[in-house]
Image (spheres, coloured by chain):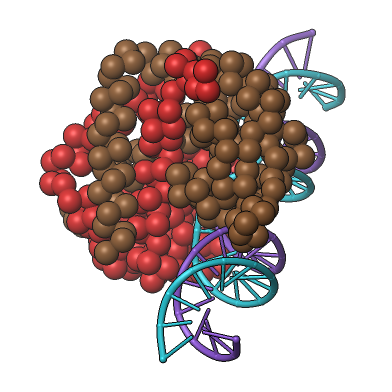
Chain colours: A red, B brown, C cyan, D purple
DNA sequence: CCATAAAGTATTGTCAACAATTAAATTTTG
DNA sequence: CAAAATTTAATTGTTGACAATACTTTATGG
């Protein structure tokens, strides 16, 4: 009478497990990110630019699923910190080009402890984490496909 | 020379897949949550209180991994919306008791479409989602254990 | 060539997340 | 019993997430 069998318990909600897990990783990363004076989405921008020194706000938004209302102020702070430069494209002034600075590139080595910390805290092997990643990426792709319909 | 083999690509970062997946689910839920005039963490508070009509700020914080800086204003908004009531414990005035109202309880039925929408958008069977949930909960538990050390 | 539509970005406003600090009440301890 | 330690919440301040709106530039149709 008190509870409804239709209603899932909190712990049975996949959405909550993912939400809680994502925030648990953020808490784990925080000391390392603080050390580098980075926030998590700033770290993701750098991960992207370490592979590909130049991008645009639009492209970063697509890759990270972040919109310009998030990215514009975030990238301005990163520019103020000397990690990236922002320049409007000469040929099409609608486009904002973002490229990494030497200081930004230099953080790559110092940041290798970050994915390492997840590996250690998880108590799992890299292959196990990779398997989880494949599964979550499949789910993510399904959700992204569904949202386009 | 351009890229460093040490450095994982963005898509190889489990942290990013989880973060992106969690936000994709939020986007999926938004129309349903808007309909109920709820935010996602408010929905989680209700999921908790639907099973267990009464709780405290401390207990909600533990279950949801949220601190009082998040919960206090969130619960005040829920009280203003008539979904919960907040009363200090008579015996120990440090404790803030939270209990669900009839209006809050009444949302339970209307909210059943929310987990349903994830099932549909995922294109998977409930058992597959349950398997993912078990895996993620294991990882979450490992991270929580590691953080206590 | 001009009017309109489309695309890209910036701005504004609300809620959330969370660290750090403060305050108040209770419990423990000497 | 009084002082210290602990527990619980609230407050303050910064950043992030994202919807809605506005603004600017480019493309297109007549």
Give the residue drawn at x 57%, y 38%.
B54
**Residue nearest the viewer, comparing A20 with A95:** A20
Give the residue drawn at x 16%, y 47%.
A124
Is B38 displayed left or right of A71 in the figure?
right
Corner quadrant of residue A13: top left
Q: Is residue A12 visible to us here? A: yes
Is B25 displayed left or right of A29 in the figure?
right
Query: Residue B46, relative to residue C15: is it above or below?
Result: above
Give the residue drawn at x 40%, y 62%.
A30
Coordinates of residue C19 in the picture (x, y in percent): 50, 67
Quarter of the picture containing the N terminus of chain B is: bottom left
Q: How many numbered discs, if any?
A: 0
Coordinates of residue B39 in the picture (x, y in percent): 62, 35
Q: Is residue B7 visible to us here? A: no
Coordinates of residue A134 in the picture (x, y in percent): 24, 31
**Residue nearest the viewer, comparing B23 with A19:** A19
Coordinates of residue A56 in the picture (x, y in percent): 50, 45
Query: Residue A31, relative to residue C16: is it above or below?
Result: below
**Residue nearest the viewer, comparing A138 with A55:** A138
**Residue nearest the viewer, comparing C11 with B32:** B32
Quarter of the picture containing the C terminus of chain B is: bottom left
Is B4 displayed left or right of A50 in the figure?
left
Give the residue drawn at x 69%, y 45%.
B86
Query: Residue D30, relative to residue A107: is it above or below?
Result: above
Query: Residue A106, relative to residue B103: is it above or below?
Result: below
């Amino acid at each position: 009478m008190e509870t409804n069998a239709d209603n899932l318990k909190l712990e049975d909600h996949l959405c909550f497990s993912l939400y809680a897990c994502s925030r648990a990783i953020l808490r784990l990363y925080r000391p390392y990110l603080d050390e580098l004076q980075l926030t998590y989405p700033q770290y993701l921008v750098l991960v992207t630019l370490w592979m590909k020194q130049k991008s645009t706000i639009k492209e970063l938004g697509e890759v990270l699923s972040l919109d310009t209302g998030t990215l514009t102020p975030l990238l301005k702070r990163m520019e103020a910190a000397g990690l990236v430069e922002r320049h409007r494209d000469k040929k099409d002034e609608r486009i904002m080009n973002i490229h990494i600075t030497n200081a930004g590139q230099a953080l790559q080595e110092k940041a290798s402890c970050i994915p390492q910390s997840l590996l250690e805290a998880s108590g799992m092997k890299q292959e196990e984490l990779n398997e989880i990643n494949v599964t979550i990426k499949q789910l993510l792709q399904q959700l992204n496909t569904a949202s386009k319909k």
